[in-house]
Image (cartoon, coloured by chain):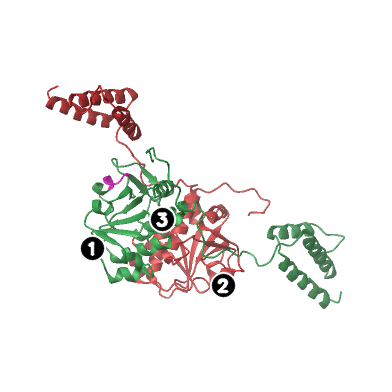
Chain colours: A green, B red
Amino acid sequence: MNQTATLPSPPLPGEKRLENIRIVLSHTSHPGNIGAVARAMKTMGLSRLTLVNPKNFPDDEAMRRAVGADDILQRATVCDSLDAALADTLIALAVSARHRSLGPAPRSAREAAPEVLELTGSGEVALVFGNETSGLSNFEVQRCQRTVFIPANPEYTSLNLASAVQLICYELRQAAFDGNPPLFTKAIPFASPRATHEDVERFHAHLERVMIATGFLDPQQPKRLLPKLRRLFARTQLERDEINILRGILDAVEKRIGH
Amino acid sequence: MNQTATLPSPPLPGEKRLENIRIVLSHTSHPGNIGAVARAMKTMGLSRLTLVNPKNFPDDEAMRRAVGADDILQRATVCDSLDAALADTLIALAVSARHRSLGPAPRSAREAAPEVLELTGSGEVALVFGNETSGLSNFEVQRCQRTVFIPANPEYTSLNLASAVQLICYELRQAAFDGNPPLFTKAIPFASPRATHEDVERFHAHLERVMIATGFLDPQQPKRLLPKLRRLFARTQLERDEINILRGILDAVEKRIGH
């Protein structure tokens, strides 16, 4: 989009870019929704909230619903017009479920997010959400340069305001980190290293001995029992600790039956 | 995942697949959240809700918050154990922000969604959400075969229960339709066909005449005015109606200045 002849500035890290996104709520009726929006924003690393003529704000219900995101409410800007709310932004995107014959061509949240993030490298970008019941007016949509929609169930598109903000902010966070946002804790998926080929083979030999000793497996009529067990354990990709547990069970069985 | 030797059944359409997903809420404290979850599910085309020991249900606040998704509440199943809630499912996924050293390896919602949708071709899949404050217990997570997380802001991971359901259902809907879910109405981005090359050239010639007539453009000193205007209008990709409007303005100017 940037058509100037200047060299592009180096990309900002994801967190910094998200700070350049302004969430604008126009004519919100329920203060609880404003609090829920603050919470939704903060879970995705956004912090700038601007309110255009909210019905009640500041408000206790908004604070209550913000649950730890009250810093965003405290720093929220209240304006009496959409133009004031969009002051100093590079571009504004209207979030709207309705398609209109005039106004900018609509794109889905997932399609729009990368462009928004790219623009945040040059300045602030606004995402504008309308009233809970009536949405954005045509006047408001025409003040924006883009329209974004959330692809909802065509039979029931009634997204809660905070849910809509949540989904948009989620897509922006995904785009800010190219689908790999930093996590709270590193995953520790397994407590034990993978078993080696030899470990697994020794386990299968042990299992076979015990099955024969217990009379479950007739070595003259093995049918497809052994390959079936091999397939099962191949899928589980056994760990070393697990092999130890399984062989411990087999040992105990052997002891019990006197082998 | 399907390891049986039978031929795979033909894939179900997206809507049918979403009907095979069961949202399980365990020990939900606030009935309002149950209603908000029903609404979130319905916006993404999900319909099966199962509640394990909800504190209050059925409840007026749940109905109020469901706003048109009360059919989902009416058909909700209430169970007294997670095992009962998971009866007849093929697989269960625990939705949890906390990573645990035991339990299944966690994957992000976006990574997990395609596998969930693939499994819905063979039967029901459950997604399990814990209590608003304490989340899922280790016991509950170990009843599931997978863990899914929503990549939230590491400084503030406090997603509202309905928001978490909303994001997961959104990713499932995206996966059900390979990123192209059907929309409420077809977009009608523009009311008029694109202008042809000749239309645009006639407009530029007209604009140049008027700029000269008004004294704004000195043909002896044109500087870079014309290429700059060409670049501007090249970016906008003018439509036929827009050309007519712009040339109408130029006509009016010419008439007014007596050309």
Between residue B5 and residue A106, name the one nearer to us.
Answer: A106
In-image side of B214 versus A135 (left or right): left
Residue, disc 3: A18
Most common secondary structure along the magenta stretch: loop
In-image side of B34 versus A201 (left or right): left
In-image side of B239 versus B4 (left or right): left
Residue A83 image position (x, y, % from top left): 24, 51
Do discs 2 and 3 share a chain? Answer: no
Do discs 1 and 2 share a chain? Answer: no
Q: What residue sits 84% from the left and 66% below the top?
A: A209
Residue, disc 1: A55
- On the question of residue A47 being in view, the answer is yes
Between residue B17 and residue B216, name the one nearer to us.
Answer: B216
Q: Residue furthest front?
A: B221
In-image side of A113 versus B10 (left or right): left
The span picked out in magenta is A141-145
The three-letter code of the residue at mark 3 reads: Leu
Residue A211 image position (x, y, % from top left): 81, 67
